[in-house]
């Protein structure tokens, strides 16, 4: 049964590409009425045209667009047209939440900025997403630009190789989560006081807030992270990969001393537990290359299935590296697929933005 937690809530989305629309879809998944206002002079959200070569070039939508635009009503307007602009303002003023990634100067000129709308609707929650923290900086920025500017590209890739981008719009998704969290706090504030709020975040701040341990490694020790593939700078063997006898790749994520002991038992390398070079995590990080050579020699005698079976039985964190075909053969992944029939009868698919459950009959979730 579709979640109805936010049934009766009205959300108006002046947002395109991924971060803002992902926030709108979050509320749609939980039962809110979400109206997405798209620019009719450009054919709507720019991602409608971001198609794979295998997609129908004449289709009004792309798979990319479908990923974050489930469950919405779509209103095509030209805000430069007085009648359309009046309709957009009227729609926004009737909302509980407005989501915008308009440039502030454009929103002000069109009368859909936070201050203008909240003069007439004090209960309105206006959620503004920008590229950079300074609201006056209207420089355009896509996800890859922020991955570069916030340091992620400098850390991603193989040692000695070029920088590698995350294969999803990573910073956009982080910003969407930040904006959702701020809107939920604003809803709580409105429930308590009756007053709306203006909430803001930027792609840059969202990216910086997610540097986490890598930021602390630098701030506390001066360590500048280098590209090291999937390996973890603080733990070994963690993120290290090994080739099995059948040509498949095994990934290890050994985070505790108990897990390392169990790994050595599975691989018949108990002698490593007596070697001072591998007895602590710090020693293993220091001697990572030598340790990996020893582990590889043993893993290369096992098939991936045999290695996974034995490691899982010993409760050693390990993984096979799945492609998306394999991912969506997993029952849990299939349960997270949302379908929607579009105009013309085309069935579209995407993954839920929601990965939590709330218990209790009253919630309807």
Image (tube, rainbow, N blue to C red):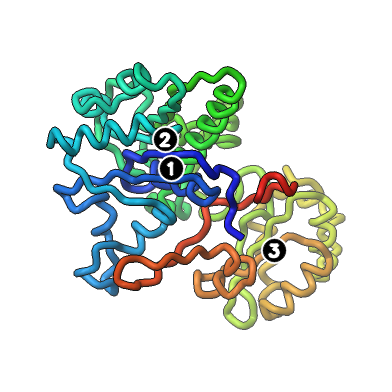
- Callout 2: 10 Å neighbours few (<14), some, many (20+)? many
Residue at left offset 16%, top offset 36%: 83
* Element assignment for label 2: loop
As helix, strand or loop, the secondary structure at mark 3 comes to strand
On the image, numbered disc 1 is attached to which residue? 171
Report the side of 9 relative to 261 (left or right).
left
**Picture coordinates of residue 225, whole percent (x, y):** 51, 39
User: How far apart are labels 2 and 3 at the CA level?
Assistant: 30 Å
Which part of the image, by quadrant, shows the N terminus? bottom right
Q: Secondary structure at mark 1?
A: helix
Tag 2 and tag 3, C-beta contact below 8 Å: no
Compare residues 6 and 249 and report the one nearer the observer: 6
Badge 3 local density, few (<14 within 10 Å), some, or many (20+)?
A: many
The label number, if any, that marks residue 318 in the structure image: 3
Does label 1 or label 2 sit earlier along the sequence? 2
Question: Which residue is labeled 2 in the image?
Answer: 150
Q: Residue at x 41, y 28 (%)?
A: 126
Q: Earlier in the sequence, mark 1 or mark 3?
A: 1
Q: Position of residue 262 (x, y in %)?
A: 84, 61
Measure how far apart labels 1 and 3 are at the Cα level.
27 Å
Mark 1 Cα-neighbour bin, 10 Å: few <14, some 14–19, many ≥20: many
Residue 290, given in percent of the width and then of the height, sits at: 67, 58
Distance between mark 1 and mark 2 Cα atoms: 9 Å
The numbered mark at residue 330 is none
Instruction: Say if mark 1 contacts mark 2, CB within 8 Å.
Output: yes
């Amino acid at each position: 049964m579709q979640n109805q937690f936010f049934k009766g809530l009205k959300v108006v989305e002046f947002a395109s590409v991924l971060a803002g629309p992902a926030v709108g879809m979050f509320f749609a998944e939980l039962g809110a009425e979400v109206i997405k206002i798209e620019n009719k002079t450009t054919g709507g959200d720019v991602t409608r045209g971001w198609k794979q070569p295998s997609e129908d070039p004449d289709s009004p939508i792309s798979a990319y667009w479908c990923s974050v635009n489930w469950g919405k009503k779509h209103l095509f307007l030209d805000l430069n047209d007085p009648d359309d602009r009046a309709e957009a303002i009227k729609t926004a003023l009737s909302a509980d939440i407005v989501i915008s990634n308009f440039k502030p100067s454009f929103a002000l000129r069109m009368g859909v900025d936070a201050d203008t709308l909240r003069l007439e609707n004090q209960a309105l929650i206006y959620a503004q997403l920008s590229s950079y923290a300074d609201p006056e900086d209207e420089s355009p920025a896509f996800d890859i630009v922020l991955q570069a500017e916030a340091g992620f590209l400098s850390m991603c890739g193989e040692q000695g190789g070029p920088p590698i981008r995350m294969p999803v719009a990573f910073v956009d998704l982080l910003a969407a989560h930040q904006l959702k969290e701020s809107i939920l706090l604003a809803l709580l504030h409105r429930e308590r006081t009756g007053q709306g709020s203006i909430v803001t975040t930027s792609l840059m701040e969202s990216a910086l807030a997610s540097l986490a341990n890598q930021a602390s490694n630098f701030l506390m020790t001066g360590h500048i992270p280098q590209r090291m593939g999937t390996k973890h700078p603080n733990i070994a063997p963690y993120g290290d990969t090994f080739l099995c006898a059948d040509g498949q790749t095994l990934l290890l994520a050994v985070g505790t001393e108990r897990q390392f002991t169990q790994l050595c038992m599975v691989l018949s390398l108990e002698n490593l537990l007596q070697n001072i070079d591998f007895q602590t995590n710090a020693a293993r990080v220091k001697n990572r290359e030598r340790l990996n050579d020893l582990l590889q020699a043993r893993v290369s005698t096992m098939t991936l299935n045999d290695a996974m079976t034995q490691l899982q039985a010993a409760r050693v964190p390990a993984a096979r590296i799945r492609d998306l075909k394999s991912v969506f053969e997993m029952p849990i992944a299939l349960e997270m697929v949302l379908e929607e029939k579009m105009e013309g009868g085309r069935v579209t698919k995407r993954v839920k933005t929601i990965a939590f459950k709330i218990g209790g009959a009253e919630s309807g979730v």
